[in-house]
Structures are given as structure tokens and as C-alpha cells.
Image: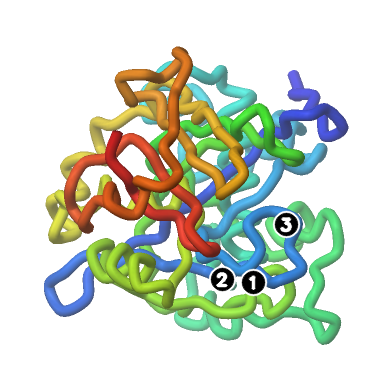
Amino acid sequence: MDLKIETSKSIRPASTVVLVREQDQGLQVYLLKRSSGSGFFPGSYVFPGGALNPDEGEVDFWQQHLDLRPKDLLGVFGSGLDRAALIAFGVAAIRETFEEAGVFLARKKKESPDSFRGIGERPPTGKLDEGWLRRKVLDEGWMLSFSNLFPWSHWITPAVMPKRFDTRFFIALMPEGQECLPDDRETVHGLWVSPEKGLQENSQGRIPLSPPTLITLHELLKFGTLPSLRQEIHSRSWGDPRQPIQIIFDQGVVIVQPWDPYYGNPVKIDPEGLKEKIIPVGESFSRLWLDQGIWRPVGI
């Protein structure tokens, strides 16, 4: 049975992929800078991702083109989604990673040395037609690498935001023989960076991070190497959905995370004291303050 994906309602289902690799014996992640014309966190650095397309709910088709057996999906990804939804989110994750970063999380049924030659190249217009992934797997014999997708977190955009998404964050290991290439449309710059450096550069205003990106990098700080992260992702689930609360006041915006001790209760913000409450990189936090275009962790 296929899954009907609603795209017209206020909260759209979406997928995000945290590409990771080991470089110089340290963990790195891939970040993309969204274009200034983007309708969601323009100019911010994020992970590849976006909303699900309606055809990604065609489960009867997609389950024939996965490198995992459909009956094994729940065992790999855990509870929280049924098999149809898991397939739709995973297909969207793979499509968005290719569209925005030029990385194809797939393998051919019949491998050859040049399977990935020129894989990240886009058409002259820079825009891929709707349905390109479906055609590609059929015409070229690709199997989507669900075995290289691991659940990390589940985010729901704050209620006051004009665009809202129900997003599943995946971890994926950067495949060998490929390189990341921003599409120069939705994303205008890309870079590999360690979680610590990414957070430090955000604090200096050089790599402005979106709130979920900032928090994900903070969570990844404890994994200094790829082997240590591997141990985590093989037993991790998406966990409870995270729906932050956004508080808007004259001098700016504060986002309160679900693990804040006052989450769900009236929160008083002292705008004048926020600068003194900025938290250094690496220390725990539950609130983010938008300060001149930069999201900064702040204390209570």
C-alpha cells in the first residue's frame, strides 16, 4: 500500500542528512550555506535536506529499489514510523542529499569501476526535473543505500514559524569515490568541518548555523572519531519529537528547547542580560538567542 504525502498543510514532512567522515583522525560533517533568497534560514549553514515529494509515498515502487529488505526496516530504524513512512522519509533523504550536495547514497545492482564517475554533475539549468530519482533507479539500475542511513533526531518547527516541518534527521557515512558539490541554487557554498570548529566559527559569526544544526553539532562533540560515532548510530533511535518554543520580543528572539526546565511554562526573558549569559562552546544549554543574525546558546 502506498503512503499519501500531504504537501499543502501547515506542517510538511521532511528529511535531513548529516553527512559524516573521518579526516586527520577526527570527525567532520558537511555543511551547506542556504542562498539569501531561501524561504527557510536564508544565509545559514545547514545539512542537506528538504520536504518530501508526493511520489516518495509510492511504497510499492520504492521498496523494490532498496538495499535493505522491506521487512527488515523496522528492525534497523526502530519504532516511531511504519514501514511506508520509513521508506518515504529515506527516499527523500537520499534525493535531497543528491540535489543539494551532489552525493548519491546508492549503489548499482551491477557495480563497475566507473559507476560514480561524474555522478554529482547537474543539468545545464542546474535544476533536476521532478521524478528524476525514479527514472534514474529504473534506467540505470541503482539501489538506494538505506543501509547507510541511521536515525539521529526528530524535529518539529516552532508553532510561530511561517514555514513548518516535521523532520527526521539521518546520519550517513560519506561514500568513497564521491565529492560534495553544492547546487549553486538552493545552496551556494559547502564545507567539511569538525563539530567543534563549526560551533566556534558560529560564535564568531563566520559560519552562521541554523538552530537544529547548532544543536546537532553540539551533540556530536562527544564523538571525536568516526568509530566512536558508529557505536552510537547502530543503537540510536530518533527519540521523542523535539518541538522548541520560540519567544519573540522587541530586542530579538529566544528559542526554548524541550529539555529546558521551564519548557511548557511561562518564560521570562531579560533582554538586557542576554549578552552576559552567552554559553561557551562545549557547555550544555537549553536556549538559543538570535543576536544580530547569529544563534547563540544562552543560560537561564
How far apart are the two marked residues, 2 and 3, measured between alpha carbons? 24 Å
How far apart are the two marked residues, 3 and 1, measured between alpha carbons? 19 Å
Return the residue at label 3.
133
Mark 3 secondary-structure assignment: helix
Crowd tier of the residue under label 1, counting other residues whose Cα lies within 10 Å: few below 14, some 14–19, many 20 or above: many
Where residue 19 appears, x then y in whole percent? 41, 60
Q: Identify the amino acid type marked 2.
A: Lys
**3 or 1: tag closer to the N-terminus:** 3
Where residue 143 appears, x then y in whole percent? 56, 52
**Contact (CB < 8 A) between labels 3 and 1?**
no
Q: Identify the amino acid type marked 1.
A: Thr
Return the residue at label 2.
33
Residue 115 position (above or below residue 290)? below
Q: Is residue 246 visible?
A: yes
Crowd tier of the residue under label 2, counting other residues whose Cα lies within 10 Å: few below 14, some 14–19, many 20 or above: many
Q: Is residue 110 visible?
A: no
**Contact (CB < 8 A) between labels 2 and 1?**
yes
**2 or 1: tag closer to the N-terminus:** 2
Q: Quadrant of the N terminus?
A: top right
Point 28% across, 40% down: residue: 299
Residue 268 position (above or below residue 253)? above
**2 or 3: tag closer to the N-terminus:** 2
- Give me the disc on residue 187: 1
Mark 2 secondary-structure assignment: strand
Point 30% across, 20% down: residue: 261
Image colouring: rainbow
Q: Identify the amino acid type marked 3.
A: Leu
Mark nearer the viewer, 3 or 1: 1
